Amino acid sequence: MVISYRLTVVVIAAVFLQQALAVKHTVGGSQGWEESTDFDSWSSAQTFKVGDELEFKYSPLHNVAELPSESAFKQCDVSAASNSLSGGDNNVKLTKAGTRYFACGTSGHCEQGMKVKITTVAADGSPSSPAGSSTTPAATTGSTSAAGPRRQLISIFGLMVFVTILV
Ligand SMILES: [Cu+2]
C-alpha cells in the first residue's frame, strides 16, 4: 500500500509540475494586443512551449482572428480566419508544436502590423538562450520575459517541498 501511495503522489506531482512549467504569455507584453506594439520583437524574445497559453488583452476596437496559413498571414486575409475571438481578454492554449498565425480582424489593423506568428516547440525542448549574442547588455528591454522563468522556479521549489513532505 505504501508503494501505491507513493506512486499516487508522484503522479499528482507530475501533473502539478506540468502546470507549474506552463507559462502564460501576454501577447505584446505590457502593451498588449494593440496597433502600436512591435509583435516581432515581442515574439522573438519568447519561447513558446506545448502547454503554454497565450493571453490577448485589448480594447474594444480590436479582436483576434486566427489565420490558417502563412499566405493568409502575409496577405492579412482576415476573411479566411479559422477562429475568431472577441471581448478584450482571450486565452489560447498552445496544444501542439508548430506555427500559428494571429491577426486583428478590424479593417486595416493587420496591415498596420497588428499580427503575430507564434511558433511552439515541444515542452521538453531546452529553452533557447541568447547564446553568443549577449555581448551587449542592452539586449534586454522587456520585463515580461524575466517574470516567466522566475515564476517557474518558485513553483518547482514549492512542488519539491510538497513532494518531500508527502513521500
Ligand atoms: Cu485591431
Image (cartoon, helix red, strand yellow):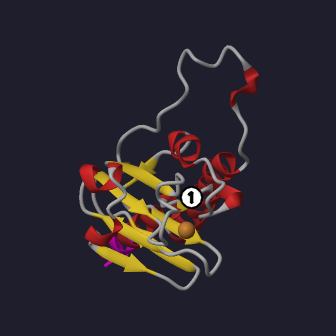
Tell me if 93 is positioned left or right of 62 in this view.
left
x and y percentages locating residue 22 in the rendered image: 48, 61
20 above or below 37? below
Residue stretch rendered in magenta on the structure: 1-9
Crowd rating for badge 1 (residues with CA inside 10 Å; few <14, some 14–19, many 20+): few
Residue 63 in the image: x percent, y percent? 50, 75
Q: Main secondary structure of the magenta part?
A: helix
Instruction: Decide whether residue 7 is among the magenta residues.
Output: yes
Up the image or down, 37 lies above or below 20; here it is above
- Amino acid type, callout 1: Met
- Could you tell me which residue is drawn at 51 percent across and 39 percent down? 44
Determine which quarter of the picture holds residue 89: bottom right
**Mark 1, residue position:** 160
| Residue with the most extreme bottom position | 87
Q: Quadrant of ligand 1?
A: bottom right
* Residue drawn at 44 percent across, 50 percent down: 48
Q: Quadrant of the N terminus?
A: bottom left
